[in-house]
Image: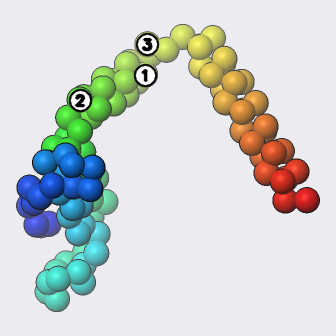
Amino acid sequence: MAEPLQNEPGMDGDPGAGPMPNVGDPGAGDPNAQDVSLFEVLQEQIKYQAQTHPYATVAAAAAVGYVLGGGVPWWAVRAATSIGSRMLVARVMAAVVDEQ
């Protein structure tokens, strides 16, 4: 299993934002380490996010639960997709024009 999170100050001054644990890198420190499963990597990432940004983690979990529960009406999804695709096309076109 991965090392526990360290409680060192991070770059942004947050006292709980220590360095990310070395998950998924079997040779990073322990030569006898085994491969880490995807579930364990996700579990460590969620733990890290919950410790460093608890309110954002709770908000993200609530949003995912709301969407999976069928709480977003079809017209809102359609509008968001339409707006997002227009923004994407505008950025791609701007990048193409800037390259030429």
Question: Type of residue at label 1?
Answer: Val
Please count the marks in the image.
3
Considering every residue shown, the one lying at the far front of the view is 13
**In whole angstroms, how far apart are the C-alphas of marks 1 and 3?**
5 Å
* Label 2 Cα neighbours within 10 Å, binned few <14 / some 14-19 / many ≥20: few
Dividing the picture into quadrants, the one containing residue 71 is top left
> In the rendered view, would you say 47 is above or below 27?
above
Q: Which one is nearer the viewer's eye here, 2 or 54?
A: 54
Expressed as whole percent of the image width and height from the top left, the position of residue 98 reads 84, 53
Alpha carbon of mark 1 to alpha carbon of mark 2: how far? 18 Å
Q: Is residue 86 left or right of residue 55?
A: right
Of marks 3 and 2, the one in the foreground: 2
Residue that carries the numbered disc 2 in the rendered image: 55
| Cβ atoms at labels 1 and 3 below 8 Å apart | yes
Residue type at the position of mark 2: Tyr
Task: Please determine whether, in this image, residue 44 is positioned above or below residue 23.
Answer: above
Q: Residue at x 81, y 45 (%)?
A: 94
Mark seen at residue 71: 3
State which quarter of the image contains the N terminus: bottom left
Q: Are marks 3 and 2 in contact (CB under 8 Å)?
A: no
For label 1, the SS is: helix
Specify which label sits upstream in the sequence, 1 or 2: 2
Check residue 67 in the rendering and tell me which mark sits there, or answer none: 1
Callout 2 secondary element? helix
Query: Quadrant of residue 65 in the image?
Result: top left
Residue that extends furthest to the bottom in the rendered view of this protein: 31
Figure check: 40 above or below 29: above
Which element type, helix, strand or loop, lies under badge 3?
Answer: loop
Viewer-side label of 1, 2: 2
- Mark 3: amino acid: Gly
Left or right of residue 59, residue 68 in this image: right
